[in-house]
Amino acid sequence: MGTPLNWPQRPLASSGVIGWVGIGILLMVFPVFMSKFWLYLITFMIIHAMYAVSFNLIMGYGGMISFGHAAFFGIGAYSVALLSVKASLPFWLVLIAAPIFGGLLALMIGFFCLRSHGLYFALLTMVFAEMLYHVVHKWYGFTGGDNGIQGIPLPSFLETQTNYYYFVLVLVVVGIFLFWRIVSSPFGHAVMALRENEERTDFVGINTVRLRLEAFAISGLYAGLCGGLFALLTQQVSPDVMFWTKSAEPIFMGLFGGMYTFFGPIVGAIAIVFLEHFISAHTKYWAIFLGLIILPVVLFLPEGLYGTFERRIKAMIRRGGEI
């Protein structure tokens, strides 16, 4: 049965690879001519680009709308803060713990939520995320409550803004490449089949509950790593990283850039982070103006910015007779 949505395509097989390679080279030379503020902001963008990608696995590829993705981002951030500040564990153990805790939390939440579908699933994920937010917000003796945790240490080789930028860039590029391998694998195609028709996927012998749980756990793992990198970037963490608005961010990023494409959420994350910082520097009503920018894109470009661009480029290539 047909669907109005296009399946995400293999990005490395498209003609846009050259452009992305150029962007990669540009990212490598950014520290040469960027101020510390812009380097910080670009690092922030890169982290949130992978955060949006992590959400794209469950919504764009799997068709599961979650309102609780901030729980995994937040648990990654707090695991880094608590293990480094209170337990004084080595940096690499702390960093590895972030995705592990994110994935484990996704498994636990998914076990209770993934037998539900649609709105019920979305609301259940939001309930679990809000419960975790309030625990963190009120547990002053352990999490610091609404004061959060400050002074997260960095190893000496990451103390400069430039070194941390390169560190994050390498991790995110490797992470996104592995993500591409995942969605291009038989597992990724099974997840897409799940989105198109779960009942038919179940009929061909695929355990759909297990498949959804695995995709949910991988998504939580990625989000946990993003939360850990974010905590190390800011060197502090507060309950805001688990608030419901943090769960809304990857949804808006995906819709703005193109939820049903591979690179769309990356484009959406970069655009929204830039717009948020630019508009908030000029008015305290930045959220209103940001909404006025996002709304027309969602209404009139349902494929998102990158999705619409990709579709039109492919149409031009077909009209020109090129492969």
Image (tube, helix red, strand yellow):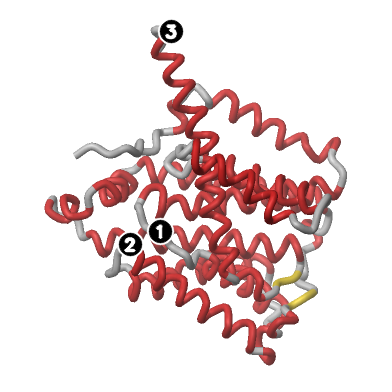
- Answer with left or right where residue 124 lies relative to residue 135: left
* Spatial separation of the CA atoms under disc 3 and disc 2: 41 Å
The relative height of residue 110 versus residue 85 in the rendered view (above or below) is: above
Circle 2 SS class? helix
Q: Nearer the viewer, residue 289 or 276?
A: 289
Tell me, for residue 118, which label it has, or none.
2
Residue that mark 3 sits on: 320
Q: Earlier in the sequence, mark 1 or mark 2?
A: 1
Q: Which numbered disc, 3 or 2, marks the residue closer to the eye?
A: 2
* Spatial separation of the CA atoms under disc 1 and disc 3: 38 Å
The crowd level at tag 1 (other Cα within 10 Å; few <14, some 14-19, many 20+) is: many
The crowd level at tag 3 (other Cα within 10 Å; few <14, some 14-19, many 20+) is: few
Residue, x 57% and y 61% (percent of image)? 225
Residue, x 39% and y 38% (percent of image)? 8
The relative height of residue 222 versus residue 235 in the rendered view (above or below) is: above
User: Is residue 265 visible to us here?
Assistant: yes
Residue that mark 1 sits on: 65
